[in-house]
Image (cartoon, helix red, strand yellow):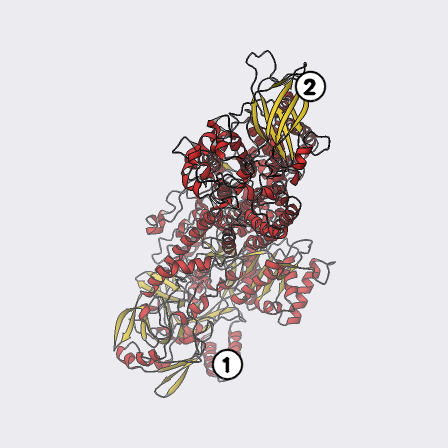
Amino acid sequence: MMAPSYNAKEEDGHQPGATGHGGAGTMTNKKPDNTAFKQQRLPAWQPILTAGTVLPAFFVIGLIFIPIGVGLFVTSNNIKEFEIDYTGVDMSSPCYNCSQSYSWNNTQSCTCSVHFSLDQPFESNVFMYYGLSNFYQNHRRYVKSRDDSQLNGDKTSLQSPSKECEPYRSSDKPIAPCGAIANSLFNDTLELYYIDPNGSRTAIPLVKKGIAWWTDKHVKFRNPSGNNNLTVVFQGTSKPVNWRKPVFELDPLDSDNNGFINEDFIVWMRTAALPTFRKLYCIIQKKPNNMTPTLPRGEYILEVTYNYPVRSFDGRKRMILSTISWMGGKNPFLGIAYITVGSVCFCLGLVLLSIHYRYGKRNNSAEISS
Amino acid sequence: SLNYVVFPPTEKERHLRANDRELNLSYKYADNAIKTSKYNIFTFLPLNLFEQFQRLANAYFLFLLCLQSIPEVSSLPWYTTVVPLVLVLSMTMAKDSSDDMNRHRCDKQVNNRKVEILIGGELQSEKWMDVQVGDIIKLENNQFVTVRMEVIKVSAEGDKVKGETNLKVKQALTVTGKLEDSIEKLANFNGEVRCEPPNNRLDKFTGTLTLNGETYSLDNERILLRGCTLRNTQWCFGLVVFGGPDTKLMQNCGRTTFKRTSIDRLMNVLVLNIFGFLMIMCLILAIGNGIWEYQEGSKFAAFLPKGVNAPFSAFLTFWSYVIILNTVVPISLYISVEIIRLGNSFYINWDRKMYYPKSDTPAEARTTTLNEELGQIKYIFSDKTGTLTQNIMTFNKCSINGKSYGELLDFSGQRVEINEKTEKVDFSWNNLADPKFCFHDNSLVEEVREGNPEVQAFFRLLALCHTVMPEEKKEGELYYQAQSPDEGALVTAARNFGFVFRSRTPERITVVEMGELVTYELLAVLDFNNVRKRMSVIVRSPEGKLTLYCKGADTIIFERLNPSCSNLTEVTTEHLNEFAGEGLRTLALAYKDIDPEYMEDWKLRHHEANTAMDEREEKLDALYEEIEKGLQLLGSTAVEDKLQDGVPQTIEQLSKADIKIWVLTGDKQETAENIGYSCNMLRDEMNEVFIVSANTAEEVRKELQTARRKMTPDGTEEPTVKKSRSGLFCLLKTETVADEPVNGEYAMVINGHSLAFALEKDMEMELLRTACMCQTVICCRVTPLQKAQVVELVKKYKQAVTLAVGDGANDVSMIKAAHIGVGISGQEGMQAVLSSDYSFAQFRYLQRLLLVHGRWSYLRMCKFLRYFFYKNFTFTFVHFWYGFFCGFSAQTVYDEWFITLYNLVYTALPVLSLSLLDQDVNDWWSFQYPQLYTPGQLNQYFSKRAFVYTVLHSGYSSLVLFFIPWAAMYDTVRDDGKEIVDYQSFALLAQTCLLIAVSIQLGLDTHYWTAVNQFFLWGSLSVYFAVIFTMYSNGMFLTLISSFPFIGTARNSLNQPNVWLTMLLTSILCVLPVVAYRFLRILLWPTINDKVRGRGSTHLSLVRQDKVLPPAPRRVQARRTSTRRSGYAFSHAQGYGDLVTSGKFLRRTPKSRPALFSQTDSPLAQTQPQSYRTISEWEEPPLSP
């Protein structure tokens, strides 16, 4: 069976003096170097998919994945999340009127109150998001339409924004902030009230700071320098067409939260990857005394200043209240996926094991036919 | 590729006059300066760029670049295309410039060689480039010729020694020959030459020389071609007829076809299909965009800048997606393929196991673009002489007076294997002995020295009966110039055994017999020819005894023996069978004492016949027949046509690898058959060896058909031809003749004459079918052209990869015709090597070249291509899926920098290390199981099917890589409640998942994990993380705000546990099915590779690679007794009898005599007895690689 192989030992050059006979050959020796690399003899590890390695791997993966999955699933389930759609599509919806009458150029603000109740108390910090659906913030023309230099406080860009911003580059004066993203800034105002069992309304304090990435707030976005008075800084620019207020008046309450470093603005400018997304609106901080939950069970009212039109493209607006965990917001997918993959792995391991028992022996003894 | 000036077709006839530069210059013939280089400093950049953009791939990327400059279309920034393109262009440029520099150097060297030109009545040393048409130049021995010239005068009259292959006798016209070497006469020579215009026919020349009003015709005999070397003459004067680009060599050079591998062709087809596929993808997405714009985009217009109407938007999107999805055909594919091939070529050059110490020759990959094809060879066409054999004849055994010599027996009477260590017979008692001669049987020497009369007569015969010419430069240093190597071997044997052939004149032969000088009178030489198959001499000894000595083919000699020898004949026949069974070439020797009176009479009649005007040959033959009768048998000789080391083993290995070996040789049928047996290609246990040697087309057809019907009695009459189309755009029509099943082993021997008929259009199919059913095919007496035709035939109808191996100029045509040409750098000059793709010194290295290097190269290339397509398709498909979630707006999933660097940086080195270092099993196992070679022949590792599998696999992977992150990230947030599903974080997640997944896939594909692989794989991943952290850092952003908008993404994303969990999940999901599938495949349908790998892993730890198995016996000598034997101490040419008796060769002055044999490397002084040649052509290296 073994093929008689011509074992050319002399060619390997192990014979002493084999090359010395060529007269001048010793000097001009063309014999290749005997290095492991050149002779392709580099030491190597040659893994093979054997039953001894593959099957345990399957079981181990299965055994690791299932607990992770369970952990993730439980964590995700423990997260409390409440979501309410306030677009006002239905006639019955309190915001129906606002949604009907509304367009960008409307100067009259429209407010509506949405009642809802929480079945469970929300402990710890509660995060309030606004969610948009069917909103293509990831559209190429949309994503491109911004000027990062301008947003970083570059004065030249402030006066002559990038061409990418067209057609939201200038009206009569250069627009700051320019571009479609800024132009379409979400401008609904949401307020939350708790209705005591006795019927009185308590406004829940909403913290609008610390909702943007630190890097965005401190590095990526900067107001043009030179003057603390933003009005002066932004002189010679005009507000985006759809905006009611110029950029330096975005937050009337907090003067540090104005201009390009307005956190709502920063959050909006971090465009979403998918057409359905949620963005952090504010944080409801847990009570200092820790005795009562941040949001106790009961009735609430969401007061919406309805500015943002989404009906035209069949969009939806939502308000989401959510707690968080070490793995972020509520998303049961990862947990389920881990459990599934883990079990599939385990089952596959079992199947392969049985196949191995049935057929493996046969092949192990099989001769290599010459 | 050479670009030289094509001579204007207006030249109908060339006219020139010797020694008249003015007149000759007026014709404006090309001068002798050679220019093979393509560029100079100024033209390099534009010309090279122009050439590069003629390549489809580069042009395509230029087109992409143009697309990207349109802002409406541009979906990627300019650098994603420019960086790779510039890289590729500059790498190619570097390679081209170094190539061209070499050509410049080569040109310079050739142009500046010195030559002596006759100018103004004296010889002046000038550069070759200054040689003009019409000049008379002087060449000396061993000088290269770099013009084409007419021979005026050769110093020694052209001796008629004709070598086996490429030796040409060139003789001057008598009229010019009279000029001698007198400069004066030559300077006054004013002959005019009219001849054909430049062309590339090597074997034809027509022209006339007009001298003093008389016209002489000039033919090929009088022409020295560029590229040949002068041999065996002191000098030669010539008239330059063509210079530089007009010469036949240069006219032929441009013809070299560019060889492409089948993978190359497949790749081109695939790339074309991929383009189609790309267009379909883009079309789908564009239509999607149209619909989206119509349904959503128009309403979304308030948010979107520059809303356009749906059809136009779809149109723009189409082109945008062409840009984004271009990564399915990445530009780096081509450059990587070239690098891999180059690397694998270097391995061949570096291989110590293909280095031949005796001639200090390493193997050389002369072409760096064909490596993987070495792993797919299905047919090998081999030359015989110098390729399978060493072209060395050695006197091996003999049988004298019924006793066999040459065998070594031990005490128990068993044969002893003879090898290099066996003690040799000591010939030191004979001071004229050839030190290179080896013999192992001491008894023969003893018998000779004891004076055994039969043994002495035996060697006397060998010393007398031949046409060898001796040369004695120094006292006692004898060199023999023999017409055939066999004859040289026999005379050398006699010399060593004390019967030294010393010198000859037309009338006398001087021999030193056991130290005593004896002169025999040579009365007649009864020369050898093909019909007679014997030669005799009639000599008169000093004592006055007349003897006829005869040697020849045994069958012929036995017919002419005296009946008293019948007992001896029987024993000798037995010995002959034994010798033949060992593959030795045998001859029978006989003698006869002649009655002086009869001799007188015979001599008279001989003279009459010799001078007869008509039927001279027949009359002579009858006379010879008459006297060569009643011979006394002396014995027989056995000469070994030494095979190269390891040839039978190599052939066995290769045939186990299912490679068919055809021997195409110029030798006679017997020789070829004999070699076939001795290297195990023909075996006695074969069912039948068909011999096709018919004289008419019909007979040949009949013989072929008979053979075929015998092999497949129930086979179909009509061949099964599968017609298909291949090539780009399926323009190539191919016909493939299916292999037919055969019961048993057959072989076919066909001679050149029959082959000529069989290669005709109407019979080639018959030949092909019959030949392909045979285990072994031997074609003998074939011309170089036929060799090429046979190769072409197989190429045409088998669609299989062919390899031709040879060492001589007559193999060049087949080396060029085959997919891969291998040159054996041996004794036959350099021409085969120079036209070959690979060269090495020994035939046996072929098995290493194919079974190890070829297999690895093929495996690596296929792995590379599969993996490369996998990683790029996966990369691209994710974009496709994302299209459905971004309004088909041609938004990329990944960061633009990632797109730029993915192929160039992040995945380049790991895949290169995979495709340069991977081995499924090591070389030792490759030799143990030659069957491992077969997947390559069947195109199993990379075919259209494998490609489709790859596409499906990447489809799956891309689904996982897009939708798992999508689902995992859907509506989720960071652990501090902030954004995570923003575009930038998602891009980071998707690209990291992708990179990890393709890296793991690479790991799965790697069978041979060296430190380099590990380093590159981990290194690339680390580089990736380093790069993203750098690029997404504050510093980078603040320096170049618009280029690095991803600031902070890495920091903010990669500290999230769910991001890492998502990566883990995608990786596992990508790998899991692959592992399960591969495991199952190995378990249930293991291939030979899997089995060997499994075996290798369990045994390798025990058996160290370098000390496995004792060396196999050097030669497995099949002991068989066979009735098949051949006697041919003579090559097929007519002997030199005439020359010997005419004395023409002796009629030269003593001064010029050494010239004929002036070479110090006299054949017998070396171990290469038969490079007797006057002029061997094409010794000059061709001027372009």
Q: Secondary structure at mark 1?
A: helix
Say which element carries label 2: loop
Q: As rendered, which of B237 and B1048 lies closer to the eye? A: B1048
Q: Nearer the viewer, mark 2 or mark 1?
A: 2
The chain letter for the residue carrying disc 2 is A
What is the CA distance from the residue labelled 2 to the residue labelled 1? 129 Å
Mark 2 nearby-residue class (10 Å; few <14, some 14–19, many ≥20): few
Residue denoted by label 2: A119
Pinpoint the chain carrying mark 1. B
Specify the amino acid type for callout 1: Arg
Residue A120, position in %: x, y? 67, 18
* Residues packed near mark 1 inside 10 Å, few (<14), some (14 to 19) or many (20 plus): few
Work out whether A128 lies above or below B72: above
Residue B158 appears in view? yes
Residue drawn at x 26%, y 71% is B124
The label shown at residue B1117 is: none
Q: Is residue B1089 above or below residue B106?
A: above
Residue marked by disc 1: B616
**Amino acid under label 2?**
Asp
Location of residue B811 with respect to B907 vertically, above or below: below
Quadrant occupied by the C terminus of chain B: bottom left
Tell which residue pokes out farthest to the bottom in this image.
Answer: B213
Residue A292: x and y in percent read 61, 13
**Residue B62 location in percent, x, y?**
49, 54
Q: Position of residue B64 (x, y in %)?
A: 52, 52
Outermost residue, front side: A108
Q: Quadrant of residue B495?
A: bottom left
